[in-house]
Amino acid sequence: MIHVGYDNYVSLDPIRAVGHPGSAPTERLVREARSKGLLIDFSAGRRYKAVLILADGYIVVSHLSPETVAKRAREEWIERERQVRGTVSANPGGAAPLLQAC
């Protein structure tokens, strides 16, 4: 689980992308998720800075920056790998490459 602000957490597994809400397509995605009941707003009424796209179609918005969310996700992924394998590979698979690109 990664902390996305105000004592709210999101599981690392379903995260497919972390982005900035500044583009028109991202804003459209958030609007559509809100109208379909698929938006989870963890911004506590503040302007959101990060948009998390989950595998099941849900969209999470947070007041934290995308960089902060991606860093926390990477740290969680590395810790998980250490627990499972005892080491972390130089070229991790799974969600890590996506999150490293943010």
Image (spheres, rainbow, N blue to C red):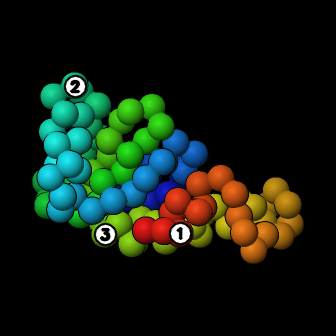
Q: Position of residue 14 (x, y in %)?
A: 52, 42
Answer left or right for 78 relative to 66. Answer: right
Residue pointed to by mark 2 = 36
Depth check, front residue: 41 or 58: 58
Q: Secondary structure at mark 3?
A: loop
Label 1: how many residues lie within 10 Å, few (<14), some (14-19) or many (20+)?
few
The image's mark for residue 100 is 1
Q: Secondary structure at mark 1?
A: helix
Q: Name the residue rendered at 23%, 41% in the picture.
A: 29
Q: Position of residue 93 (x, y in %)?
A: 69, 57
Mark sitting earlier along the chain (1/3): 3
Q: Position of residue 38 (x, y in %)?
A: 29, 31
* The quadrant where residue 96 appears: bottom right
Label 2: how many residues lie within 10 Å, few (<14), some (14-19) or many (20+)?
few
**Identity of the residue furthest to the top in this view:** 36
Q: Position of residue 83 (x, y in %)?
A: 79, 61
Answer left or right for 26 relative to 84. Answer: left
Q: Amino acid at mark 3?
A: Ser
Q: Is residue 73 visible?
A: no
Label 3: how many residues lie within 10 Å, few (<14), some (14-19) or many (20+)?
some
Q: Amino acid at mark 1?
A: Gln
Q: Name the residue rendered at 86%, 66% in the picture.
A: 86
Mark 1 or 3, closer to the camera: 1
Q: Name the residue rendered at 48%, 48% in the picture.
A: 16
Mark sitting earlier along the chain (1/2): 2
Q: Indicate whether 36 appears above or below 90.
A: above
Residue pointed to by mark 3 = 65
